[in-house]
Image (cartoon, coloured by chain):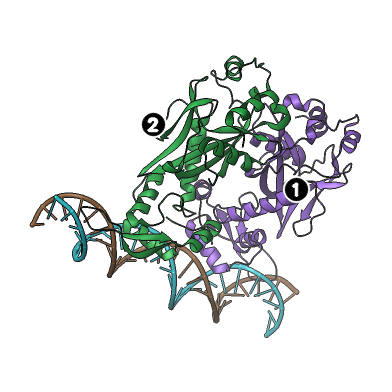
Chain colours: A purple, B green, C brown, D cyan
Amino acid sequence: MISAKEEMFELLAKGGKDYRANVSVDNVIFGYHEKELKVLLFHNIHLSLWMLPSGYIKKSEDAETAAARVARQRTGLDSLFLQQFKIFSDPGRNVDPLFTPEILGKLAGYPIDQNHWIFDAVISIGFYTLTEFSKVNINAGYFSEEAKWWDLADLPRLFLDHQLIINEALKSLRLNLYHYPIGYELLPEKFTLPEIRILYETILGKQMDDRNFARKLTSLGIIVKLDELKQMHGHRLPYLYKFNKEVYQQALTEGIFIS
Amino acid sequence: MISAKEEMFELLAKGGKDYRANVSVDNVIFGYHEKELKVLLFHNIHLSLWMLPSGYIKKSEDAETAAARVARQRTGLDSLFLQQFKIFSDPGRNVDPLFTPEILGKLAGYPIDQNHWIFDAVISIGFYTLTEFSKVNINAGYFSEEAKWWDLADLPRLFLDHQLIINEALKSLRLNLYHYPIGYELLPEKFTLPEIRILYETILGKQMDDRNFARKLTSLGIIVKLDELKQMHGHRLPYLYKFNKEVYQQALTEGIFIS
DNA sequence: CAAATAGTGTCTTTTAGACATTATTAA
DNA sequence: TTAATAATGTCTAAAAGACACTATTTG
């Protein structure tokens, strides 16, 4: 595996040869941890902007592979389930007063011409994924020396149209939540009903009826009650549940309906 | 509006300058007419292959605009509702033994080098639409001197991965049928229950219960019964219905559920 | 009256949605 | 016993799904 720095150098120098011109991938990496939903952003010190982990697509790989490669380089995670949700092709989308040949040249260490293909109109293929905070080992890389999980309600000024991309990714995530099960990668193997309900509530940004919610998931067979209580303090102990992996997998393929 | 021939010439000559490299749009145009669902293909005489109406994307336009432009040039229709359904980015997807510099050179009228960007890995953005046969005025254009509506079950050998693209488009069309109303552009202003039911049955490739189907559409308010019979011969005359445009539009935006 | 096709209603089962009380634990 | 939080059940309304007979037209 080459480093992000090596890759960036290679890209700028001979991008037109090994990478697909005019196309990129943008990853929106959502992170869930203890009742909070955040998004992973990287700070580009040259541009003084926060941005999504993005990258170009090699001519020898498909878009999914490129998105996975970029995600792996930045987070160290190999197993992220990246979902392609939308493409962004507005002709003006890669114009930003802080994204200029001068700035990029400084960053690369040698002059970059304004006709460099990196300033061409670029179609971006948007991917999102959802993971557990604590699993992620942030690898900030060359462009950025800082990375941070940001609260969705409190984002900084972002590069290009990355704010729009995050908004659209969140819409897709929420929509998908109603049609596909979630939680396998986000919860411990054994979890309680309140834990999984709060996961849903956090992502959807709204409260759900605890009785109806439990009834839905158990009647679908996606979760199974264990004969075991979670040890806590100060109140009644909640039962532990686990996923029924077969039903869960089938629901991922065939879809479900949660209202 | 420039012709397809002029556009193609322009594309080959200076594509790298005005068009986005490594990206194209492929339109799957489904046509419905009297209980039949077909797809519109064009025959490329140079390549001796049938293909989808495809094109490149100008740097000054977005993907939707490019798809609409290509569709308009080939069909004369301005009002097609093109739906972006999937991208195709397999690195080997544009390799075809019948798509070579020699053949393309003949087609262009001057030599095309094998390093021409048109042979680069190309990501295709797939769009589909559904229209009425009889509304379409086929404009075969430069590459193709024949165009034809093909039965989905009986397609010829297709260019590149266009067969796969059609398969995926059909999947999306069918899935969408369960969540969005259809028929406004496909049926006459006044239509009968059997007509709209058969439209659904044709696209889905399966029979539906007539009573439950009628109940669903009327209870949603999408169609409204008129106090008028369709004049036919030899059997009981069916009532005419019309769409409730407000409800229909709202259902397009917010989605419905038809099982 | 026969052939063709359209129209229509009912019953059952499942699901959604609203809603409040009891149970358990630690301090 | 209090504070905190979890567990649980019932009723109603709506929707899905299965199913068969009657009505109208033409020849």
**What residue is drawn where x is 53% and y is 18%?**
B98
Q: Quadrant of the C terminus of chain A?
A: bottom right
Q: Position of residue A170 (x, y in %)?
A: 67, 54
**What residue is drawn where x is 51% and y is 26%?**
B144
Front in this rendered view, residue D26 or B235: D26
Q: Quadrant of the N terminus of chain A?
A: top right
Q: Are marks 1 and 2 on the same chain?
A: no
Provide the secondary structure element on which disc 2 rests. loop
Q: Nearer the viewer, mark 1 or mark 2?
A: 2
**How many C-alpha atoms fall within 10 Å of the one at disc 1: few (<14), some, or many (≥20)?**
many
Q: Amino acid at mark 1?
A: His
Vertical comparison of A133 with B219: above or below:
above
Q: Is residue A12 left or right of residue B23?
A: right
Front in this rendered view, residue B222 or C11: B222
Cα separation between marks 1 and 2: 44 Å
The circle on residue B154 is: 2
Front in this rendered view, residue B191 or B253: B191
**What residue is drawn where x is 42% and y is 42%?**
B134
Q: Position of residue B166 (x, y in %)?
A: 49, 36
The circle on residue A162 is: 1
Vertical comparison of A125 with A239: above or below:
above
Q: Is residue A156 left or right of residue A205?
A: right
Q: Amino acid at mark 2?
A: Asp
Front in this rendered view, residue B201 or A7: B201
Vertical comparison of A1 with A239: above or below:
above
Q: Badge 1 sits on which subunit?
A: A
Q: Decide if residue A217 is in sight here.
A: no
Q: Where on the picture, by quarter, is residue A106?
A: top right
**How many C-alpha atoms fall within 10 Å of the one at disc 2: few (<14), some, or many (≥20)?**
few
**What residue is drawn where x is 54% and y is 18%?**
B97
